[in-house]
Amino acid sequence: MPFKTKSRSAALSGQNMASILVQIAVLALVLSGVYFLFQNTQANLTARGIESGFAFLGHEAGLPIGDSLIEYNPTKSYGYAFLIGILNTLLVSAIAIVLSTILGIFVGVARVSPNWLLAKVAAIYVETLRNIPLLLTLIFVYTVVIGSLPHPRAPISPVEGVYLTKRGVFVPRPVVEDGFIIFLLAVMIAGAISISFWIWARNHKKTTGRSVPGFLGGLGIFSVISTLAFLATGGAIGAELPTYSGLNFVGGLTLKPEFVSLLVGLVLYTAAYIGENVRSGITSVHAGQIEAANALGVSRGIVTRLIMLPQALRVTIPATTNDYASLVKNSSLAVAIGFPDMVSIGGTIIGQNGQAIEIIGMWMAVYLTINLLISLAMNFLNSRVQIVER
């Protein structure tokens, strides 16, 4: 028996050694390939007279950029121009994530609605948008929908101060008035009080078993205090309305056709996928719970808000995380309609100085960082909504 044990140990030790040697050989092969590619790339760059490195980011760009969140002119550096692209990508992605989530939840709930017409319309929307390439959707919105809007001299005005034209969407611009700091402090205090009330309501229910409308109560407190502060400061936030002058609108806030087209396309496309996530999450809830709530006479709205949606989150969130990441990456299609996002500006930089490797590396690093942050936030949210078994 001791002899067999020693033989078995020696065999296992030999297998482990062989496994280690194989891994070392594979690692050496990979590193050799990376070194070969690096040397070959350096030789090609030298032959073409292209210097590697990121020193070019400090050179004057000379790029005209139509949309920018911060002040920009062509005398700025390449690095500053690339920053403009990053900010534009973040802006359109953040707004699209919020709007597509709202629309996706509505579509997902509509998909399981007992209303036959509403469910069929939602199903047609999902199947249509999911089976058409996003690029075609963007081009359709840009050339057909936006292109068919009227000239600014005869705009479509759904509400006062909002004008839809083929040159863009013109909306009121928020303007800070006197007393804004006081109003902002009041809003922050109202937010703190509302959150404290919500926490107290949750603890009160745990200790006494009596339910207190924490969310609605906190929202009411926030609304009342904010409204009183706004009235007390005499309107701390005003609005600058756009007005037609000459050949176009002046004043207000201008949303250019490229930005609107990209935003609408991303929202419509991503909401179709999020709607399916919500639908699958809702259908995963055990039917017995819904039947029990119906037997107790609970309204359908409360059943949806307090029974179905909270449990559906544990199924919906992981899939929606992938859709958020895809939305950020899909924003790179902005180059097809002329919106100056990070990829569009980076491509222009490559065309001017040939620093393709550096720009591509910067693209990869930015997209990787954004999606890792999204995954981190969504994984934290997912851990908070998971059902904990006793």
Image: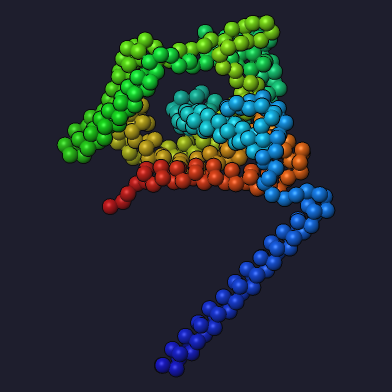
| Residue 358 percent coordinates (x, y) | 68, 47
| Residue 123 percent coordinates (x, y) | 55, 30
Query: What residue do we see at 37% from left, 37% from top?
Result: 310
Inspect this view and state whether residue 338 appears.
Answer: no
Inspect this view and state whether residue 191 appears.
Answer: yes
* Figure disc tally: 0
Q: Relative to 390, is 350 above or below? A: above
Query: What residue do we see at 56% from left, 13% from top?
Result: 252
The answer to whether residue 287 is left or right of residue 131 is left
Q: Quadrant of residue 146?
A: top right
The answer to whether residue 187 is left or right of residue 204 is right
| Residue 338 percent coordinates (x, y) | 70, 28
Q: Quadrant of residue 350?
A: top right
The foreground one among 347 and 198 is 347
Q: Quadrant of residue 183?
A: top left
Q: Residue furthest left?
A: 208
The foreground one among 319 and 371 is 371
The foreground one among 107 and 224 is 224
Q: Relative to 106, is 148 above or below? A: above
Query: What residue do we see at 52% from left, 85% from top?
Result: 11
Q: Relative to 244, is 23 above or below? A: below
The answer to whether residue 43 is left or right of residue 297 is right
| Image quadrant where one finds the N terminus | bottom left
Q: Relative to 217, is 50 above or below? A: below
Q: Residue furthest right?
A: 47
Query: In the rendered view, how is the structure colored?
Result: rainbow
| Residue 302 percent coordinates (x, y) | 33, 29
